Amino acid sequence: MYLIITFLVLAFLLSFWTGYRRILRLQHLNQRRVVNGFVGAMILLTVISAGQWLDLISWDIAAHFTMFLYCIVSGFFFGFAIKMIALKRSAREVKYVYRSFWTDAAPNILAILIIVFGIYRTGILHFGPYTGIGITSGLSLLGFGLWGSTIKIVPEFRDKAILILDQSVSWKKVVAYRWQTENVLLIEYYTTDKKLTDFTTYIPPEEELRIERLLAKKLKEYHQDRKEMMSKQGNNP
């Protein structure tokens, strides 16, 4: 039992470190990878179920393996969530973010429901029975809910950086902005691997002047830092 718990804790800690380092981000996901991941998970579950049905895999082995997977998932999302909280703090206060029920309240409500269900799965709310699968699956839901509460589907323009989903873009990496359409703002910036990219976001008509003033102020404020960064990139292609 102690050996199993040790392996589960090590799996959680290793996965926590992976999540905190954000080795896998939302930008790495595409349709092919999502489909391949889903198919792989289904094949794995099918093999385990077939092994149990054929008496090739005992219930204990299947349960321990399932707990191991739950620990990996929970560790990753807890680590990622803690990192996102740290990024938000380092980016300081919010200067502008587009708020509506569907972009702000609805995702938070969903995250809270997932967290509550995760607590329920652990058995804490009804004081048992406590099982390994129940606790680890509850922790995975808790981690996922906490991670979801830190991810905003619209950009957050903060004092030191712009938060875009799970990315933090320093103002010195923001190169330019322009109106792609009447209410859609396009912002160009450099990624961590020195590639120029962009994102678009909806801005209500009554907020356009406010966001333009903020962007103009930040581009001017970080002009020298941006110039030095681009100069270094030119010297180190």
Image (cartoon, rainbow, N blue to C red):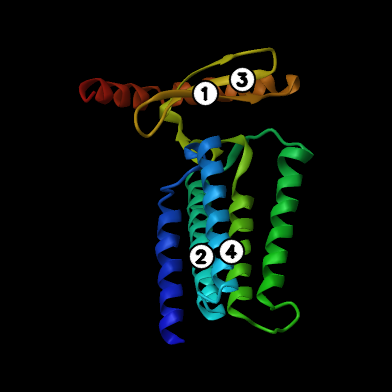
Where's residue 29, x and y in %? Answer: 51, 39
- What is the x, y in percent for residue 213? 59, 21
Which amino acid type is shown beneath numbered disc 3? Leu
Name the residue carrying label 1.
217
Which label's residue is closer to the chain start, 2 or 3? 2
**Mark positioned earlier in the residue sequence (3 or 4):** 4
Q: Quadrant of residue 116?
A: bottom right
Identify residue for label 4. 140
Separation of residues labelled 2 and 4 (CA atoms)? 9 Å
Amino acid type of the residue tagged 1 in the rendering: Lys
41 vs 2: above or below: above
Instruction: Tell me the SS state at disc 2.
Output: helix
Cα distance in 3D space between marks 1 and 2:
47 Å
Secondary structure, mark 4, is helix
Residue 30 in view (yes/no): no
Residue indicated by mark 3 = 185
